[in-house]
Amino acid sequence: MARTAAAALAPAASYSELDLSGDFALSSPVRKLRAKTITLPGDVHTALLAAGDIPDPYFGENEQAVMWVHDTPWNMERRFTAGRADIDGYLTLTLDNVDCIATVFLNGEEVARTQNQFIRYDIDVTGKVKVGTNTLRLEFAVTKDVAKARYDAHPFPIPYTLNYLSNGLPGVHLNFVRKTACHAGWDWGIRLMPTGVYGRIALRKSRLARQESVQVSQAHGRSSVELSIRTIVHAFAGGSVELMHEIAGQKIADKVVVRPGENVFTHNLTVKNPRLWWPNGQGEQPLYELWTTLDGERTTRRVGLRKLEWIVEPDAIDHNFKVRVNGRDITAMGANWIPADAIPSRITPDVVRDLLESAQAVNMNMLRVWGGGQYEPDYFYELCDELGIMVWQDFMFSCMSYPADREFLADVRVEITQQVRRLSHHACLALWCGDNEVIGSLGWYPETRANSKRFIANYDRLNSMLGNIVEDEDPDRRFWPSSPSLGYMDFEDGWHKDTRGDMHYWSVWHEAKDFSAYREVQPRFASEFGFQSFTSMNVIETFANPEDLNPSSPVMESHQRNAGGNARIVETMLRYFRFPSSFENMVFLSQIQQGLAIKTAIEFWRSTKPRCMGTLYWQINDTYPVHSWASLDYGGQWKLLHYMAKRFFRPINVVAVPEEDGQSIVLRGINDTAAKAEISLEVQAVDVGGKARVVFTGRSQTSPDAAVDLAHIALEDLRPGEFLFFSWRDKAGRLIGENDYFPRAYKAYEIQPAKIVSRWESADGKPVLVLKSDKPAVFVTATTDVPGHFSDNAVTLLPGRETRLTFTPRRGAKVTQKALASSLKVRHLRETY
């Protein structure tokens, strides 16, 4: 065989890397701009905003004013200088997270074409870089035009998701392009369709080979863990390389022989007396550093040692569905995660850490990375490892069918293989899931309903390939075909069957059912369900003028992506609450009812343990300021749902559930810790005027195995103006938690005006707000302009009792009591009307 010019080289230098990120010249062949540069990693919208070419897309109705950006082709170019040492070897141009359809030129020569945002492109440019000045240029096509051309060329029509039609926008055939699906808009998302490069941009020099991936599998014994380290190496030519791994004070050094192309090497070592990794709330999260060196190319990964299994087994009901860590069944508690911002440049490690720390702070131990978003950057999973947050990882397919021709499947095969190899070493990664609601979408569209057999076969070609890749690349983890799903090769309805698999339950929001409908189903694992609220008032003020502060104003409706969403929020208020007296009170009340809806669902489903072993509500975060299902405002501020989540996700909890006979209320104890716990429970009947009487006291054992009945309260024993307030303590008498239950809608009670007084104290160096009320006050909420959160909020105050709320600033900021007090506002339900 003839030797190529690259193969004829005899490079002797070790690994080095030339960072090519930074300022690129920005231009368009069809438009003149003020913007002359773009910073990569980054996106076009950020560059245009900085130069004044576009207004803030998030303000008012500016989404329409910036539509031209994604209708425009873009060019990005930079010069870089390379020395002799930079190019004395085999050269790889690495471009990661290129969004999306780009032709790549190096010194005027086309070296690659990219078409998949989720692929890391490693381009062999050996012999194409010169000493001195070089030019790298990326020419981006208009993604929606490429997608439409592919749709037109496909043998049969495949519809795009209806979520692209929010606010009357035209659809985009984004199922034909591998790009973050919600970039084209969603029922909570703005349409920006950004363009740019969001990951690594580097010229890598190797002596003979480069690292592709390092994976770690674990075999757990009684007092040791055997690690199998699988290293994939790309070799440019035949020869030998030095490969070394270091972890837990141990080192494996090996000289291995490589052949051109992909090479796989496996090394084993044993960690004795390992410190085990546990999910948040179940134990610690120790992480071991794994260093891998290949001829000077050194990478590091943090590995948590744990045995994680996803259990799907027959039981007396049908099949269970749960996660087991280190032999212990864990109730998954958390939410669904979407990209942290609609403008990619704004997604930073600090922003993501802030959001994830807010998840950890409210007892969450799992997030589902939703299939219409993106595979998150490495630091997301590293933070989840650190914080003990397990990750249900969807592959990026959502709410519509996709092509299954050989070219599309080949591209996706590279994508999935790379992503599994990149992420599989993380302790946090709990499950690979094929898609979000793609099985269900087969019944949504005229095209798919008209030829269901064709689309089922089409779906199976793609989905089976995903499962096979996981089985080959990460056999220790379970592949779940879809969410929701009833299981392997099962195309039945996963939305309404609650005896097996995971369930998406949307009847309360989309069908406007009463909150009590959450108690009509008993899912094994609720992986999606939600209820909307308006975003917080201070967030609304960032995108709306005073004249826009009306739920049906054009601006407020443009920041509501779900058809009829604002009307549904307001209509629901009439069922449960008295109509609010102002727009600001309407916003506050919407967040109360959002929290009440999800509290109703999760408290009941947790009370069915071990039947239900997971609740992940939709959703934790927003991509821009919008009225939505999120528990965190855009920017990370806590909404009332997030505060309530801290309570309904307590490891040891007591909840009130109306019994099926409609005559009584049962109080159930839930224990998701590792051991039995003895608790003492006190239940009071409290009159809205202030009188209280004890109706139950008792001490009980709560088991991790199942929820237990602690008390039964007959409704006939409660007077018309009374509600239940109950608290529980541990064996030593320490307060664990408090809860309440109103048998009737809040609007039916003659809640009295309350005078709430407050003062500030300090404890352990943190400011503490002390609240006291002369009458019962419900959903008492403290807010301040200082970024941060209180230890609790939306609380119930009873006369004569003090409630203490510790304030924690966000992102490590330092605050004073004076700054907190100057903007403190305390409100409660009675003040809304």
Image (cartoon, helix red, strand yellow):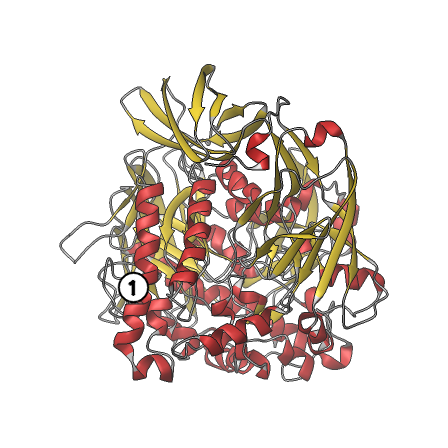
Instruction: Please tell me how many numbered marks the rendered image carries.
Output: 1
**Quarter containing the C terminus:** bottom right
Where disc 1 sits, the SS reads helix
Residue 48 in the image: state x and y as whole percent. Answer: 78, 64
Q: Is residue 67 above or below residue 227?
A: below
Q: Between 194 and 63, which is closer to the camera in this rendering?
A: 194
Q: In this view, does 239 lie above or below 457?
A: above
Residue 354 seen in this snapshot: yes
**Residue found at the very far right of the displayed protein:** 34
**322 left or right of 3 in image:** left
Q: Between 666 and 37, which is closer to the camera in this rendering?
A: 37
Residue 738 seen in this snapshot: no
**24 left or right of 694 in image:** right
Residue 121 in the image: state x and y as whole percent. Answer: 56, 48
* Tag 1 residue: 460
Task: Identify the residue at horizontal 32%, vertical 35% (top origin).
Answer: 674
Residue 472 in the image: state x and y as whole percent. Answer: 32, 43
**Residue found at the very far left of the displayed protein:** 316
- Other residues around mark 1 within 10 Å, as few (<14) / some (14–19) / many (≥20): some
Indicate the amino acid at tag 1. Answer: Asp
Residue 747 in the image: state x and y as whole percent. Answer: 49, 77
Q: Between 719 and 193, which is closer to the camera in this rendering?
A: 193
**Residue found at the very far front of the displayed protein:** 2
Task: Identify the residue at horizontal 62%, vertical 21% (top origin).
Answer: 12
Q: Between 37 and 573, which is closer to the camera in this rendering?
A: 37
Task: Identify the residue at horizontal 52%, vertical 82% (top origin).
Answer: 564
Residue 443 occupies quadrant: bottom left
Task: Identify the residue at horizontal 53%, vertical 76% (top origin).
Answer: 148
